[in-house]
Image: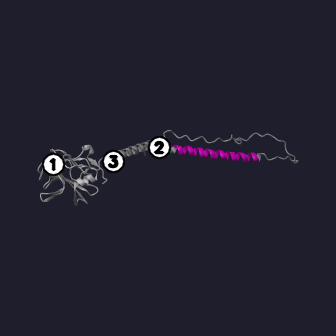
């Protein structure tokens, strides 16, 4: 049978010492009571044959009947230094782990608080609005720039499409947690894949000139109500604190992010 752990041996030692102290105290009490009874019996007055009290005599104490010294208090129980060491180490380890977890969660929360909630999808020249064009509705906006210009996720969300699409060459569709869907078209390169979780401001593609396109640009759409209804991306961006000036995107990357408040 394997030897018991150090912590259990320590606890057993404590119990054994405590039990011994209790037995010693009980034995001392019993001896004290027996001595008191013997003294009372020895103190009875002896009479002579004539009825007179006998002279006091000093008798040698019977062996083993001498009054013991007043019992002292039990010795304090001394806990071996090794008792509890394993438990103490476990507690310290648990506290250290808990502190590390709390710090990690705080850092994640702070990072999420710093991240943009809404981002401009790209920088460049605003070349086409959300409006009727050539007899059909242009359901997005166009932002032109050089080939490979970074295209950014406008919202947090999940990529539901990433790859070839009719008319777009390549497209990416992202569904946000609130049911807003954003669409990106004509990209030269793709940095994400279907099912991937992305965050506002994250680079998802490089601008291109694929599909039905007259030059390198990003075609960007916004649909609400679970991706059912198109709305004007310029208005939607403005509602979230982002200024898309006519003819160009205002500001710099440092001013490309807004909040969820509309």
Please state the horizontal and vertical placement of residue 4, each as a whole percent of the image.
45, 44
The residue carrying pointer 1 sits among few (fewer than 14), some (14 to 19) or many (20 or more) residues within 10 Å by Cα, namely many
Please state the horizontal and vertical placement of residue 239, each as a whole percent of the image.
28, 53
Task: Name the image colouring.
Answer: one colour
Residue, disc 1? 217
Q: Is residue 168 left or right of residue 251?
A: left
Residue, disc 3? 113
Residue 28 visible in the snapshot: yes
Alpha carbons under labels 3 and 1: distance apart: 31 Å
Q: Earlier in the sequence, mark 3 or mark 1?
A: 3
The residue carrying pointer 3 sits among few (fewer than 14), some (14 to 19) or many (20 or more) residues within 10 Å by Cα, namely few
Outermost residue on the right side: it is 50
Q: Earlier in the sequence, mark 3 or mark 2?
A: 2
Q: Nearer the viewer, mark 1 or mark 2?
A: 1
Residue at (58% x, 44% y) in the render:
20
Q: Earlier in the sequence, mark 1 or mark 2?
A: 2
The residue carrying pointer 2 sits among few (fewer than 14), some (14 to 19) or many (20 or more) residues within 10 Å by Cα, namely some
Q: Nearer the viewer, mark 3 or mark 1?
A: 1
Question: Magenta residues?
Answer: 13-40
SS category of the residue bearing label 1: strand
Q: Nearer the viewer, residue 37 or 88?
A: 88
Q: Nearer the viewer, mark 3 or mark 2?
A: 3
Quadrant of the image containing the C terminus: bottom left
Q: What secondary structure do most residues of the magenta stretch adopt?
A: helix
Above/below status of 28 relative to 233: above
Q: How many marks?
A: 3
Residue at (47% x, 45% y) in the render:
8
SS category of the residue bearing label 3: helix
Please state the horizontal and vertical placement of residue 133, each as a whole percent of the image.
14, 57
Residue, disc 2? 7
Residue at (35% x, 46% y) in the render:
110
């Amino acid at each position: 049978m394997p030897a018991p752990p150090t912590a259990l041996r320590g606890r057993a030692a404590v119990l054994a010492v405590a039990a011994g102290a209790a037995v010693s105290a009980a034995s001392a009490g019993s001896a004290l009571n027996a001595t008191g009874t013997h003294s009372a019996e020895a103190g009875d007055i002896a009479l002579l044959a004539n009825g007179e009290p006998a002279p006091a005599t000093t008798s040698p104490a019977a062996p083993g009947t001498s009054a013991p010294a007043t019992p002292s208090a039990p010795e304090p129980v001394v806990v071996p230094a090794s008792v509890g060491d394993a438990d103490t180490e476990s507690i310290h380890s648990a506290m250290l782990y808990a502190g590390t977890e709390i710090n990690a969660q705080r850092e994640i929360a702070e990072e999420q608080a710093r991240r943009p909630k809404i981002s401009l999808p790209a920088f460049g020249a605003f070349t086409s609005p959300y409006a009727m064009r050539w007899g059909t509705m242009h359901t997005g906006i166009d932002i032109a720039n050089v080939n490979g210009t970074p295209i950014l996720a406008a919202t947090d969300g999940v990529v539901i499409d990433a790859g070839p699409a009719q008319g777009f060459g390549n497209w990416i569709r992202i569904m946000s947690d609130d049911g807003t869907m954003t669409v990106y078209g004509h990209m030269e390169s793709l940095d994400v894949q279907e099912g991937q979780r992305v965050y506002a401001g994250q680079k998802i593609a490089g601008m291109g000139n694929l599909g039905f396109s007259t030059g390198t640009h990003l075609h960007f759409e916004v649909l609400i109500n679970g991706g059912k209804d198109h709305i004007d991306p310029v208005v939607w961006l403005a509602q979230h604190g982002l200024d898309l000036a006519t003819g160009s995107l205002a500001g710099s990357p440092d001013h490309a992010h807004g909040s969820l408040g509309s």
